[in-house]
Amino acid sequence: MSDLSAIVKAYDVRGTVPEQWDERAAEALGAAFAQLLRTSGEPAGTVAVAHDMRESSPGLAAAFTAGVRSEGLGVLHLGLGSTDLLYYASGSLDLPGAMFTASHNPAAYNGIKMCRGGARPIGQDTGLTELRDRAQALLDKGETRPLDEPLPPLEHRDLLPAYAAHLRTLVDLTGIRPLKVVIDAGNGMGGHTVPAVLGDAALPALPLEIVPLYFELDGSFPNHEANPLDPANLVDLQAAVREHRADLGLAFDGDADRCFVVDERGEPVSPSAITALVAVRELAKHPGAAIIHNLITSSAVPEIVREHGGEPVRSRVGHSFIKAEMARTNAAFGGEHSAHYYFRDFWFADTGMLAAMHLLAALGEQDGPLSELGRAYERYASSGEINSTVPDQRAKLAEVRAAYPDAETDELDGLTLRFPDGAWVNLRPSNTEPLLRLNVEAPTPERMVALRDEVLGLVRR
């Protein structure tokens, strides 16, 4: 018997297959999703479903589809797709959707990201807890509700060309200077979407020479995990950029909704710098607009947003919080330290592909290298995220706070300490593990290292 409380997380469903969940659980989740939509007044008779390249994804998606249809709703089955392709379907067709993927997790995992019509997210506080309880009740009974014939419609449709054409309307790359780009798809869905967006012969030709790495769809991830947040998974991309004398490198995660960047030297460009760069471009289209950033992006982001006439809005970490703030403020753009990028022009949803296109446009519209362009957006030294196992997180947060009585503090997400010289520390608990996550930023590398080591000493002693 599946215990769904172990796999239904704050923002999505995620767990190992078949140990933690299987097709029977997926069918119950599909039926519960349809029930949730019907009882919450969602005005749709159809659910869009897509899946990634993992071995378990087609079977789980089919079982979920059967559950949805057992509750009287039709299904638009998109087949293989990236998460942002599913958001495109949900936004452009105003349909609720479900994407089967475990994103950057290892091959044994799978999951579901769900949304309402218009790509509005479903999280713990917006229906996911109720969905879990409904699905668990169905599993405990041992069956989903049988539907009297005829079954609701099941339509198969390929939206990849329409998705690609839509993105190309948002950023024009036809007039940029020629660029050589190494792209590491990590055997994930970037290998499916990148050729359609940047190389489709049916669309206007782009002055891009693409050097592909690991474009073969393979959910066993034979080359490296599709998790570019881990520096070990960028090594091949960095080497290829140097070998091919490329202008830049791009790395997508497993479901291709996040995009990481290295410059012409193979050096990583921080997601905070990409956030600031894209924010400037979006503010040129939407003067004075709000720009969302989570609280552990660099201080450079709100500074640059203000300098370009925008209104920076600080948010908690996590896509459900970012998307809620995007909708509340009608923000033009939002960015996170984890390389999730959100666009008003994309139904407030996240798409790594569109962020990559903005970067290509910005680089191709001027003559300098990316390392030079990026310096305008990199103003501070950052530690990156450092995890520590801490059994009593609350007590440790109190201890760290007491150690800095003169620091300015806030508790929007964990504990943030700000110092007069512009340095800051954020220490926040993991939602799912006994971890504290530390991020430190300071005006100089020396100050950052000293403050990082000092706080880590308190956390780990």
Image (tube, rainbow, N blue to C red):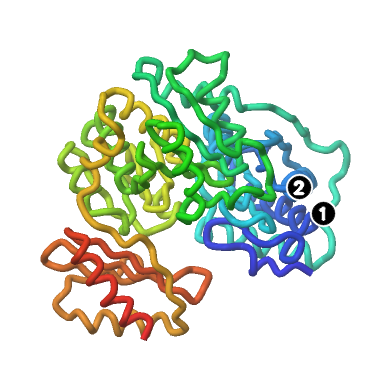
Which element carries disc 2, helix, strand or loop? loop
Q: Which of pointers 1 and 2 lies earlier in the amino acid sequence?
A: 2
Left or right of 366: which side holds 39? right
Residue on which the image places disc 1: 145
List the single residue furthest toward the front.
243
Please name the residue shown 26% across and 79% down the image: 401
Residue 392 lies in quadrant: bottom left
Left or right of 340: which side holds 212? right
Please name the residue shown 56% across and 19% down the image: 200
* Residue 342 pos. (x, y %): 41, 41
> If the image is split into quadrants, where does the N terminus sit?
bottom right
Observer-nearest residue: 383 or 41? 383
Residue on which the image places disc 2: 71
* Residue 415 pos. (x, y %): 30, 71
Left or right of 90: which side holds 448? left
Please name the residue shown 26% across and 24% down the image: 367
Q: Is 423 placed above or below 62 here?
A: below
Say few, some or many: other residues with alpha carbon within 10 Å of mark 2 (under 14 / 14 to 19 / 20 or more). Answer: many
